[in-house]
Structure formats: structure tokens, C-alpha cells
Amino acid sequence: MFESNPHVALNSSRRLWIALAALVTMLSSAVSAESATYYIGQFSGSTPADDAGCGTGKGAAPNAHPCKTIGYWNKNRRQSLVANDVVRIAPGTYTDNGPAANTGHHCILLDRYARNVTYEGRTAADGVLDDHSSVVLDLAGVSQVSFTGNNPCQARAITARHSCTTDLYSGVVVRDMQLKNAPQGGIEMCGTSSNVSSGITLDRIRITKVASNGTGMVGRFDNSYLNTDLDCRNGGRTVKNLTILDSEFDHNKGFPGGLLLACVDGVTISRTSVHDICDLPDCNTCLNDWSQSGCDDRDGIGMAGAINVTISDSTVTHVGEDGIDIGGHPFGKSHHVVVERTSSYDNPGGNFKTSGGRYVTLRNNYSWGKGTGYEMYHCSHHVKLQNNTFWTNGVAVQVFNYLTQSEFTNNIFMSQTGGYVVFVDKASTNTTNVWRNNVVVNMNSSGNGMGEFDGGALEDPKCDGNNHSHPGGDCSLGFEPPPIPCPLGTTASPAMLPDNASGVSTLQSKGAAGQWFGNNSGAGDKWGTAPAFVNAGTLNAANLHLGPSDTVAKDAGMSLSPAIDDFDREGRSGAWDIGADEFQGAAGVPSAPSLISVDPVP
């Protein structure tokens, strides 16, 4: 038999006590670090009151009870918040009127007290709300004086304190509420190079009726942007990793419109609706003339220096100018952007647009009605259009100066008017661009498939391929196209390619000669015959799915790697279909993604 070793037994006991002590310490820490929940508003059975002890419960005074107003909570009680705390707001409309009017604290305030804190709307019974209509923060009549210690909100709905120069607010979550009538802006998130906030989530929020002098901005830019700088000036990108889910931006009047992503790194926008963005009584007016005051520069989602952005399963419509504008000039170069399974339609400018943006992928998207399906203003590169369906009243694709190293694959491009379906500036015709397996159809019998035009309309591009004389149109950093034929006179007749086999043949011969989109241009193309859709009489994403009788787009696409699902998140297999929809059978035509829409668009 083996005898026991007393030293082993002692060491075992010591290890046990050490383990138990560690467990006690851990449990004590867990208890001390337990999150707290605070309350604002009229919950069932509560008596809200703005006093020194409010917010700690949802009962009736003198017991723990909710605060009555958000202004009082911000000014007097939120300083007790620590990480993982939750602030719950009861149903109702909260204003800055009454005895506590013009507090300067009526908003969702972002500073160190909001770090890793959740602000959420709740039901009266303190249940999950899951909407953005029951809890309303109305900013009509709030103080609009400049920032002071007593006016940290600065007439904005969700805002970083003190012009974004103090306090981190990383990890904050705002969900299940509506914020309206902000005089100065719906959102302002920003910081400095030494003060970068990240991991912010906006979930089921609605920002609506922002005033004419207001804006919705994430990140800040500097108008004196450097032409050679890929990043934003004055510290780069000071907001990182923003997530916006199931939200709505609508009826906002101020420049630059619905939501501007400026100098932000890492954005995910999903299942979100942006609509009715203009400073006119009816945004339909902009469809006829977007250059008029109140329409111009009112975009749905704009980017100026945003990078690493994904927009999916969303809708943008009836804005003043461009639906989704991925900008690069003059405020900062936006790059590495993906837009997928999104409908952008009836926007008077470009429904999808790159204004100098680069490394942009647009895939499985729909566009119809007014506005250009895709528009490239100038100096974009590495843009991919893959499996989109654009059927517009105007031009489906409009490419201006200096698009390089880009590709158009497996798209359906259709126009219902005369002229041409695709506009290409000669300054963008070069062998670095790829065009293949696209359907091009002009529904007007007098129209053409493509029109090639001489340069000169924008920045007077030179025949040598350089354009450095205009900072706004600079294509430096090695992304200028090869020289193009001279002279580029504005009086030359445009080259027109009909939407038939002859047009495709011309496209292929031009590509072989080093013009247009390069060698193999037009490979796999089908021009002049429209695919059979579910219901072409009423245009929307569901009706522009392929119908059972289609013989044009089915199995006519090019398989891409990596594989991407279609608009309905259904897989593609075998020979891909052209367009945003991969046909799944007559009985399996899915509808468009379900989106929150409080007010129907016009």
C-alpha cells in the first residue's frame, strides 16, 4: 500500500483554499460590478418626478421612482451611470416645455457617462418595445444658443458633448425611440485624434423632421482636404464601428440630407429606410429639377471620407438629389464600401453614385423610376457592379470622367426613354475596365444601347490622360487612365451603339482595339430583348424578379468568386442568372426585404 504524503495533502489543501478565495473574490467583484437600471417617464404604477432621488426605480414616491423629464435626468442624475447600466424610457412624447423649458439638456447626450450604456424605449409594463414610434423625443422649441455647460445638447437629437472634443462614448446603444424636430441636427458623432469613440449601435430609431439648418452627420471633415491624402485631415477618422439597424431617416430638410458618413471607419447599415429628404413641402418636386434650392445636396446616404462601410437590405427613395452617394471629392476619399440587396429608386440624381469613391462594390441591388441607376462623377476606381437590376426612366448607367480598373458583370440595364441606356465619357474608355454578361435594353424603339461622348463637360480632361489642373477632379496616386484619342472637341458627334447584335459587335471590336472597356468587352452580353419579369407593369423589387418564362437572364450570367447570394439571400448555383434575382421556381418568388416604414413614401 502507498502511504499518504503530508506535504502533498498540505499543498492540496492550500490550493483548495486559494481556489475558494479566488472564487469568493470573483463573485464579490461580479456583484459589485452588477449593472443598474434607471427609469424615465410614466411606467405602469409609477409616479415620475424630477427630484434628487429620481430614476432609481419605477414605483411611486417616496419610494424609488422614475424621473419625469430627460432634461432633468441629463442635467442632474446621469452622472451616476457606469458601464453596462441601462436607462429605460416609458412610452410618451417628451418635450422641453413647461417649468423646465429650455434646459439645454433635452437630447440623448454622448459623453463619458454614456460609455457602454444602453438607452432604450420600453413598454409601459417595462417590456421589450421593438418599435420607433411609442417613445418620442420632440426637440421643438429647445434652446439653440451656442454650447455652454448648460447647453450641451446644442439643439441636436443625438449628440457628442462639447463639439466632440471631450469624453469617449464608446459602446453606447440607443434603441426603440423616435427623435424629431431637431433644430440643429439629428445626429452628431465625432471626436479628435486622441479621442476616438467606437462600437456605437443605433437600433430601431427614427430621426425625422430635422429643420432646414440641421444635419445628420457621423464624423467630421475639413473642407481644406488635401488632394493627395487618402484619409481625412485633422486626426483622421474619429468615429469607428457604427451599427445602424432597422431604422428610419425621413422628412429631414437640412444639408446634407438623411445621413452623412464623414470621416468614419467601419459602418454597418442594415434594414434601414431613408426617404423624403428635401427642404420643400413635397420632395416629388425634386424629381423634375434637383438643382433647385431645397433639393440640391440633399442626399439619402452620403459619404465623404467614410471607409469600410456596408449597406444592406435597405431602401432609399424620394430624396433631393442622390440616393446613395459614395463621395471622394472634395471632403475626403471614401473607399472599401459594399452596397448589397438594397433598393434605391425615384431619386432625381444618381440612385447609386460614386463621386470619386474607390474600391466600391454594388451587388444584388435594384433601381427603378426616376434618376440614373448608377452614376460615376469622376475619378473613381476599382468599382464593381455585379448582378444588379436597374430599370430607369432615364439613363441606367452614366460614367463621366476617369473611371478606371472597374467592372460591370451580370447586370440588367434598362431604360424606358429614348437616347441611350449607358452613357460613357471617352475619358473613361480604356482597357482597365471590364464589361461582360450584361443585358442592355432600351424600351424606346428610337433609343440606343450605349452612347460614347467626347470629354470636356466636367473638368476639361486632357488628351494625355492627366487632369491635375483641377483639384476637385484630381486622379492622382497612379489611378489615371491611359492617354485617350485627340482631339477631344465638344462639337464631335457622339458614337451610338444600338441595343442589338450590331451594337454588341461594335462594342467587342472597340474592346479588341483597346477602346471602350478593353478586350473581351461585350462577352456574354444580351442586348435588345427584355427579360421576363414577375410584373413589369408595376415596378418594384418584388415585381422585377425573374418570371418563370424568362429565357434572357436565366443561366446567362458569369459565376463569380467568391459566390454571393441574390437579393433575397438565396444562393446561386450552376450557371448564374443575370440581375439581382436568382430564379428559384414559379412558386418561390420571394418579396423584397421587410422594412420599417412609419410614413409611406409619396
Image: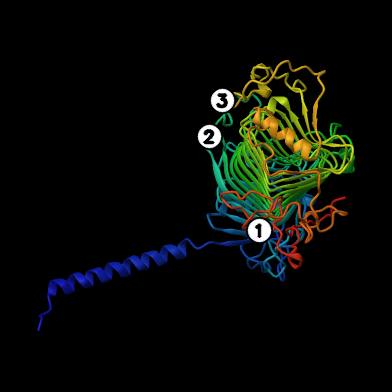
Q: Are marks 1 and 3 in contact (CB under 8 Å)?
A: no
Image quarter (top left, top right, bottom left or bottom right) of the N terminus = bottom left
Q: Which mark is residue 477?
A: 3
Q: Amino acid at mark 2?
A: Ser
Q: Nearer the viewer, residue 550 or 159?
A: 550
* Mark toward the start of the polypeptide (1 vs 3): 3
Residue 574 locus on image (x, y percent): 62, 57
Mark 3 residue element: loop
Q: For mark 2, what is the residue?
A: 193
- How far is the residue under mark 1 from the one under mark 3? 37 Å
Q: Amino acid at mark 1?
A: Arg
In percent of width and height, residue 287 lies at 87, 40
SS for dot 1: loop
Eye-nearest disc, 2 or 3: 3
In this rendering, is residue 261 above or below 601? above
CB atoms of marks 2 and 3 within 8 Å = no
Say which mark, if any, is on residue 569.
1
212 lies above or below 58: above
Q: Could you say which is closer to the camera, residue 76 or residue 202?
A: 202
